[in-house]
């Protein structure tokens, strides 16, 4: 039998190794930008075409490379950062593994131009499939330009796994922001398909944050600054009112390197405890400076996950630094010894417990069951308690026609779920005469069997969702043209997201046109979006869309429908006229699934007349 184990050829070994470092165009962008920073550049330009699939080019004015270094840079594990094993534990540069350029050269066609200040001419090198095709002198300014073309041209299977251009461009924007945020003293620019996405002038940390995340944060940032012998922490957190439903604007940097750390994020959330809603996330951009010997950044090929020598100390520092910053600016919560307003308004609190009520309560069978000694075996079968077996019997769930459960909404004792018979039995359909609105939130609707208590926002959400679903399937919603078109300016990441959603939004009544520099002109909106609220409606829709984006079971279109239905539904606390209530109820019970929202919340509860009679002893 011949021997069967053999060494892989270099180009195949490089392609396999490249899979760890270059997973998508954004991975290459990160590596090239970090190399430019390490080269001491003060100006860095990023140019991409076709979301990085056709071209990724980074041009910098750093110190450049000699002819020999330029050739050596594409060899595996070639690095100027590490001479011996001890150097691995005091890393202060962004790159150090020596894998980036070798990996890029294995999966793309690369052109490198580089020149040092002391050299008369630079060097031009062309590499394809890890092989040098051309090398010659070239006239150029000091610095380096690396262009990688046709990513994964020699690994078509990998190229097929890339997402849409809009999705890949969003990843590139994320990586660009992470590097640009770390170095406000460096000028950065970013162009995609000939259009400028970012133009970031040199400035302070606060200026860079506002440049990237938007002017809305300009007056809503709280500085964080703590210095100790062990570590320094500095940066900014957003005031509690800037908290959003998504984690988008959260950045942690350790020694100027972006990291992902659920542990440190928990420290920030704890610092904001009781200042923001439980399902909201604060904005923060925080930098930790720490002795490199106290951490290990060599635990993951992308270097976004690191290990601290003593993470508990870091956790405590982060939490206390943010609490201190918020307290200095009088943002910390005060102790509240008052009862919650909603609790105080309850009858049990606001009204006295009279003798009549005492005797009424003590005479009930439920009271007697639990207060008399040795009576546990006399619990009445007709008491207010449900039979214990009922808790273990599964209820039938409705489906929405797509196989997913619509949910019964958790109807309580004394309420039923008559929707299955609703459309076949007209006697059960509610009447729209004499409608009553309670607390500007609920609508009481009389039926032959009792009444429905309709939640106005949930009901409207269901109506809008079904209307939007029909619209994207071929029945577009009418657009109300704007007499004076408004413009909306978004941050770069949101602008890329909105461009991706434009085709579906056109079906839903929105006419938006890109106007350059992350700006859009709002030419028209659906008729039910009031004039003057177009910007707010779109911004809230994007925020809600990002909130749904963490749920992988929904398609892009489904997330858009749910986001718009949630944002455009009439809110709790809104007073409705008799006509508005009538239209709302009629539209709800004409829906295919009137009893719940798309997210499974009940739209109404039913109270039957015979159950009401029992409550009054009749």
Image: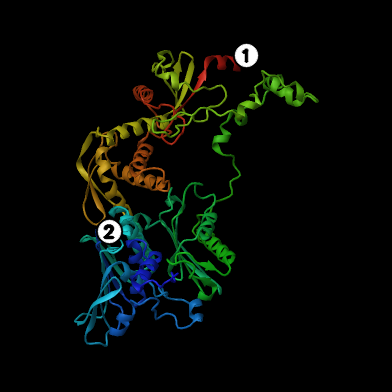
Q: In the depicted view, which residue is nearer to us: 120 or 9?
A: 9
Which residue is drawn at the image coordinates 42% and 74% (left, top)? Answer: 97
Is residue 189 shown left or right of residue 6?
left
Of tags 1 and 2, the one toward the viewer is 2
x and y percentages locating residue 86 in the rendered image: 51, 81
Q: Tell me the residue that label 2 is attached to.
A: 51
Q: Which of the two labelled residues, at mark 1 and mark 2, occupies the earlier sequence position?
A: 2
**Circles 1, 2 touching at the beta carbon (< 8 Å):** no
**In what element is the residue under mark 2?**
helix
Q: In this view, does 84 lie to the left or right of 36?
A: right
SS for callout 1 = loop
Residue 59: percent from the left, percent from the top?
A: 26, 72
Is 382 rendered above or below residue 466? Answer: above
Work out whether residue 185 can be spotted: no
Residue 137 can be seen in this image: yes
Q: Quadrant of residue 616?
A: top right
Residue nearest the observer in this picture, 424 or 256:
424
Check the picture and name the quadrant holding the C terminus: top right
Instruction: Please name whichever residue, 315 or 260, is drawn nearer the observer in this view of the structure.
Output: 260
Residue 161, percent from left and from top: 33, 55
Quadrant position of residue 347 = top right
Residue at which label 1 appears: 617
Residue 52 percent coordinates (x, y): 28, 61
For the N terminus, give its image quadrant.
bottom left
Dot label at residue 111? none
Answer few, some or many: residues within 10 Å of disc 1's Cα (few below 14, many 20 plus, some between 14 and 19). Answer: few
Q: Quadrant of residue 387?
A: top right
Vertical comparison of 547 with 11: above or below:
above
Q: Give above or below for 352 relative to 260.
A: above
Would residue 480 appear left or right of 384 to someone viewing this image?
left
Q: In this view, does 400 lie to the left or right of 380?
A: left
């Amino acid at each position: 039998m011949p021997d069967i184990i053999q060494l892989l050829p270099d180009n195949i070994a490089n392609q396999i190794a490249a899979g760890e470092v270059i997973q998508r165009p954004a991975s290459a962008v990160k590596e090239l930008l970090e190399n430019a920073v390490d080269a001491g550049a003060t100006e860095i330009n990023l140019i991409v075409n076709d979301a990085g699939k056709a071209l990724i080019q980074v041009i910098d004015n750093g110190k450049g490379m000699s002819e020999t270094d330029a050739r050596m840079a594409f060899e595996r594990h070639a690095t100027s950062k590490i001479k011996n094993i001890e150097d691995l534990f005091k890393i202060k540069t962004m790159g150090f593994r020596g894998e980036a350029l070798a990996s890029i050269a294995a999966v793309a066609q690369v052109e490198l131009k580089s020149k040092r200040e002391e050299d008369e001419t630079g060097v031009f090198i062309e590499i394809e499939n890890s092989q040098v095709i051309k090398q010659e002198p070239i006239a150029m300014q000091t610095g380096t330009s690396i262009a990688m073309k046709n990513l994964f041209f020699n690994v078509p299977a990998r190229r097929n796994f890339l997402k849409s251009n809009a999705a890949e461009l969003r990843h590139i924007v994320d990586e660009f922001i992470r590097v640009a945020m770390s170095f406000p003293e460096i000028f950065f620019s970013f162009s995609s398909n000939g259009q400028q996405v970012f133009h970031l002038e040199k400035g302070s940390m606060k200026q860079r944050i506002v440049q990237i995340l938007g002017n809305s944060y300009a007056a809503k940032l709280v500085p964080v600054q703590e210095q100790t012998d062990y570590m320094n922490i500095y940066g900014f957190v957003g005031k509690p009112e800037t908290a959003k439903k998504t984690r988008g604007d959260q950045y942690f940097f350790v020694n100027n390197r972006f990291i992902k750390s659920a542990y440190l994020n928990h420290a920030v959330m704890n610092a904001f405890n009781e200042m923001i809603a439980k399902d909201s996330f604060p904005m923060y951009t925080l930098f930790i400076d720490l002795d490199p010997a106290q951490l290990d950044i060599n635990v993951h090929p992308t270097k976004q996950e690191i290990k601290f020598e003593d993470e508990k100390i870091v956790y405590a520092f982060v939490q206390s630094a943010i609490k201190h910053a918020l307290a200095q600016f009088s943002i910390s919560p005060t102790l509240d010894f008052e009862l919650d307003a909603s609790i105080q308004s309850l009858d049990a609190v606001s009204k006295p417990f009279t003798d009549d009520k005492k005797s009424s309560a003590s005479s009930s069978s439920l009271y007697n069951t639990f207060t008399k000694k040795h009576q546990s075996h006399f619990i009445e079968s007709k008491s207010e308690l449900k039979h214990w077996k009922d808790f273990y019997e599964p209820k039938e769930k409705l489906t929405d026609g797509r196989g997913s459960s619509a949910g019964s909404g958790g109807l309580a004792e004394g309420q039923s779920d008559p929707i299955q018979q609703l459309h076949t039995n007209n006697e059960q359909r509610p009447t729209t005469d004499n409608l009553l609105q309670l607390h500007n939130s609920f609508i009481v609707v009389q039926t032959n069997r009792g009444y429905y208590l309709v939640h106005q926002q949930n009901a409207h959400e269901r109506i809008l969702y079904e209307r939007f679903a029909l619209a994207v399937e071929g029945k577009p919603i009418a657009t109300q043209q704007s007499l004076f078109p408004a413009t909306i300016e978004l941050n770069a990441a949101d602008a890329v997201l909105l461009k991706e959603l434009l085709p579906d939004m056109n079906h839903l009544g929105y006419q938006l046109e890109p106007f350059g520099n992350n700006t859009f002109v709002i030419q028209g909106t659906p008729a039910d979006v009031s004039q003057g609220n177009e910007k707010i409606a779109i911004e809230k829709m994007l925020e809600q869309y990002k909130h749904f984006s963490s749920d992988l079971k929904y398609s892009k279109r489904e997330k858009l429908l749910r986001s718009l239905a949630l944002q455009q539904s009439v809110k709790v606390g809104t007073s409705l006229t008799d006509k508005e209530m009538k239209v709302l109820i009629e539209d709800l019970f004409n829906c295919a699934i009137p009893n719940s929202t798309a997210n499974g919340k009940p739209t109404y509860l039913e109270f039957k007349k015979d159950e009401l009679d029992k409550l009054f002893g009749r």
